[in-house]
Amino acid sequence: MDKLKFEAENREKAEKLLKLVAENPELPVLPMVDYEVVGGDWGNWGGKWKDSHIGHYLIDREDIKFKEDGDMEEMVQRFTTDEEYYSMTAEQMKEFYNSLPWQKAIIVYISTP
Protein backbone atom coordinates (compact mmCIF):
# COMPACT_ATOMS: atom_id res chain seq x y z
CA MET A 1 0.00 0.00 0.00
CA ASP A 2 1.46 3.34 -0.93
CA LYS A 3 1.96 6.08 1.64
CA LEU A 4 -0.82 8.39 0.36
CA LYS A 5 -3.39 5.61 0.32
CA PHE A 6 -2.34 4.51 3.82
CA GLU A 7 -2.63 8.08 5.16
CA ALA A 8 -6.03 8.64 3.54
CA GLU A 9 -7.37 5.35 4.89
CA ASN A 10 -6.01 6.07 8.36
CA ARG A 11 -7.47 9.60 8.34
CA GLU A 12 -10.89 8.29 7.25
CA LYS A 13 -10.96 5.70 10.04
CA ALA A 14 -9.75 8.19 12.66
CA GLU A 15 -12.45 10.67 11.56
CA LYS A 16 -15.11 7.96 11.91
CA LEU A 17 -13.90 7.18 15.44
CA LEU A 18 -13.83 10.86 16.43
CA LYS A 19 -17.36 11.32 15.08
CA LEU A 20 -18.61 8.34 17.10
CA VAL A 21 -16.96 9.73 20.25
CA ALA A 22 -18.37 13.23 19.66
CA GLU A 23 -21.89 11.87 19.05
CA ASN A 24 -21.73 9.46 22.01
CA PRO A 25 -19.60 11.06 24.75
CA GLU A 26 -21.23 8.91 27.43
CA LEU A 27 -19.94 5.67 25.92
CA PRO A 28 -16.57 4.15 26.84
CA VAL A 29 -14.10 3.31 24.08
CA LEU A 30 -13.01 -0.34 23.97
CA PRO A 31 -9.78 -0.75 21.95
CA MET A 32 -9.36 -4.24 20.49
CA VAL A 33 -5.68 -4.62 19.58
CA ASP A 34 -4.78 -7.34 17.06
CA TYR A 35 -2.33 -9.84 18.56
CA GLU A 36 0.12 -9.16 15.72
CA VAL A 37 0.62 -5.59 16.97
CA VAL A 38 2.27 -6.79 20.17
CA GLY A 39 5.70 -7.93 19.10
CA GLY A 40 7.61 -8.85 22.23
CA ASP A 41 7.99 -8.75 25.97
CA TRP A 42 8.66 -5.05 26.36
CA GLY A 43 8.49 -1.70 24.58
CA ASN A 44 5.86 0.25 22.73
CA TRP A 45 4.14 -0.97 19.60
CA GLY A 46 2.58 0.95 16.76
CA GLY A 47 -0.71 0.11 15.11
CA LYS A 48 -3.21 1.60 12.72
CA TRP A 49 -6.91 2.33 12.99
CA LYS A 50 -8.92 -0.44 11.44
CA ASP A 51 -12.62 -0.09 12.15
CA SER A 52 -14.82 1.43 14.81
CA HIS A 53 -18.51 1.05 15.57
CA ILE A 54 -20.97 1.12 18.42
CA GLY A 55 -21.60 -2.35 19.76
CA HIS A 56 -22.25 -4.40 22.85
CA TYR A 57 -19.72 -6.55 24.67
CA LEU A 58 -19.56 -8.84 27.67
CA ILE A 59 -16.46 -9.83 29.58
CA ASP A 60 -16.73 -13.24 31.16
CA ARG A 61 -14.17 -15.46 32.82
CA GLU A 62 -12.75 -16.62 29.47
CA ASP A 63 -12.74 -13.66 27.09
CA ILE A 64 -14.65 -10.76 25.56
CA LYS A 65 -17.78 -11.62 23.58
CA PHE A 66 -19.67 -9.29 21.26
CA LYS A 67 -23.45 -9.36 21.03
CA GLU A 68 -23.33 -8.56 17.34
CA ASP A 69 -21.36 -11.77 16.66
CA GLY A 70 -24.63 -13.60 17.26
CA ASP A 71 -23.20 -16.53 19.22
CA MET A 72 -26.51 -16.79 21.07
CA GLU A 73 -26.57 -20.54 21.69
CA GLU A 74 -22.96 -20.62 22.86
CA MET A 75 -23.51 -17.72 25.23
CA VAL A 76 -26.76 -19.10 26.67
CA GLN A 77 -25.11 -22.48 27.23
CA ARG A 78 -22.15 -20.77 28.91
CA PHE A 79 -24.41 -19.04 31.46
CA THR A 80 -26.91 -21.82 32.18
CA THR A 81 -26.86 -25.41 33.34
CA ASP A 82 -27.36 -28.16 30.77
CA GLU A 83 -30.83 -28.78 32.16
CA GLU A 84 -31.81 -25.12 31.80
CA TYR A 85 -30.29 -24.85 28.34
CA TYR A 86 -31.96 -27.92 26.87
CA SER A 87 -35.36 -27.01 28.31
CA MET A 88 -35.43 -23.51 26.74
CA THR A 89 -37.54 -22.63 23.75
CA ALA A 90 -36.02 -20.47 21.01
CA GLU A 91 -37.89 -17.45 22.39
CA GLN A 92 -36.68 -18.08 25.96
CA MET A 93 -33.14 -18.45 24.67
CA LYS A 94 -33.40 -15.12 22.83
CA GLU A 95 -34.78 -13.38 25.93
CA PHE A 96 -32.01 -14.84 28.11
CA TYR A 97 -29.34 -13.79 25.58
CA ASN A 98 -30.68 -10.24 25.45
CA SER A 99 -30.83 -10.06 29.27
CA LEU A 100 -27.12 -10.81 29.73
CA PRO A 101 -25.15 -7.85 31.17
CA TRP A 102 -24.07 -6.44 27.81
CA GLN A 103 -22.11 -3.19 27.94
CA LYS A 104 -22.55 -0.63 25.17
CA ALA A 105 -19.33 0.94 23.89
CA ILE A 106 -17.49 2.37 20.94
CA ILE A 107 -15.44 -0.59 19.79
CA VAL A 108 -12.21 0.24 17.98
CA TYR A 109 -10.09 -2.33 16.18
CA ILE A 110 -6.37 -1.68 15.87
CA SER A 111 -4.21 -3.75 13.52
CA THR A 112 -0.63 -3.81 12.29
CA PRO A 113 0.58 -0.81 10.29
Image: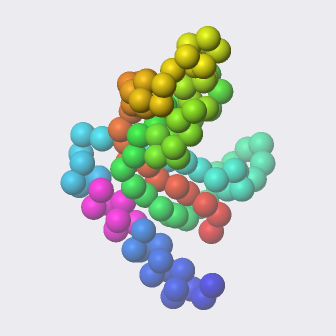
Q: Looking at this view, is 84 or 80 the one in front?
A: 84
Q: Looking at this view, is 81 or 65 the one in front?
A: 81
Residue drawn 55% across the image and 57% down it: 110
Q: Residue 53: horizontal and vertical position, in percent? A: 39, 55
On the picture, is 76 further left or further right than 1? left
Residue drawn 57% across the image and 33% down it: 73
Q: What segment is highlighted magenta in the picture?
A: 14-20
In this rendering, does residue 97 appear at all?
no
Please tell me whether residue 32 is drawn above or below residue 111 in the rendered image: above
Is residue 17 highlighted in magenta?
A: yes
Q: Looking at this view, is 83 or 27 the one in front?
A: 83
Number of marks present in the image shown: 0
Residue drawn 57% across the image and 86% down it: 3
Q: Residue 65: horizontal and vertical position, in percent? A: 55, 37
Please tell me whether residue 105 is drawn above or below residue 23 in the rendered image: above
- The prevailing secondary structure element of the residues shown in magenta is helix
Please tell me whether residue 66 is drawn above or below residue 99 in the rendered image: below
Is residue 44 highlighted in magenta?
A: no
Q: Residue 62: horizontal and vertical position, in percent? A: 65, 27
Q: Quadrant of the N terminus?
A: bottom right
